[in-house]
Image: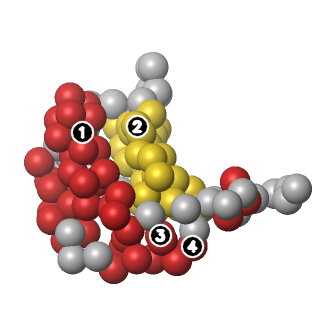
Amino acid sequence: MSSSDTVTLYIVYTGHQTDRFDRDYYVNTHLPMVRAAWQEHGLLQASALFPAEPPHDSIVAVAVCVFKSESALQACLDAPATGPVTADVSNFTDLMPGMHRTVPLFTE
């Protein structure tokens, strides 16, 4: 499998720096839940990015999820465990996440 076979999904939380977003819960509870739910379906890695000093309107957090293929991404999204993962969002934020899939600009 080459890196060009992998698919990256960015889950982006956009809001204000005053919006509720529990980073500790996100990193220590939610991301492990994501890994447990999706690894068996082809999730290779999941990590979180946080801006050091977000401006007034900005990205509050980004999850970076890398899947072994397009079909693995779809299998994860269709998995029964995705429902509880989605429901867990309200435990750490009131923001609505947006999902963005990347497309390689160059191939080897």
Q: Earlier in the sequence, mark 1 or mark 2?
A: 1
The answer, for residue 70, to whether it is visible in the render is yes
Decide which of 11, 59 is in the foreground and name it: 11
The numbered disc on residue 48 is: 2
Which residue shows up at 24% across the image and 44% down it?
Answer: 32
Q: Earlier in the sequence, mark 1 or mark 4?
A: 1
Question: What secondary structure is found at the residue carrying circle 4?
Answer: helix
Residue kind at label 4, given as amino acid type: Glu
Q: In the rendered structure, are the residues bearing label 3 and label 1 in contact, judged by CB atoms less than 8 Å apart?
A: no
Disc 1 packing (10 Å; few <14; some 14–19; many ≥20): many
Q: Position of residue 65 (x, y in %)?
A: 46, 52
Q: Position of residue 103 (x, y in %)?
A: 70, 63
Q: Quadrant of the C terminus?
A: bottom right
Residue kind at label 1, given as amino acid type: Tyr
Question: What secondary structure is found at the residue carrying circle 3?
Answer: helix
What is the CA distance from the residue labelled 1 to the residue labelled 2?
8 Å
**What residue is shown with label 3?**
73
Q: Position of residue 4 (x, y in %)?
A: 73, 59
Point out the frontmost of discs 1 and 4.
4
**What residue is shown with label 1?**
26
What is the CA distance from the residue labelled 1 to the residue labelled 4?
25 Å
Q: In the rendered structure, are the residues bearing label 4 and label 2 in contact, judged by CB atoms less than 8 Å apart?
A: no
Residue kind at label 2, given as amino acid type: Ala
Asked if residue 81 lies left or right of residue 2, the reply is left
Disc 2 packing (10 Å; few <14; some 14–19; many ≥20): some
Question: What secondary structure is found at the residue carrying circle 2?
Answer: strand
What is the CA distance from the residue labelled 4 to the residue labelled 2?
21 Å
Disc 3 packing (10 Å; few <14; some 14–19; many ≥20): many
Q: Position of residue 3 (x, y in %)?
A: 70, 54
Decide which of 50, 69 is in the foreground and name it: 69
Question: What secondary structure is found at the residue carrying circle 1?
Answer: helix
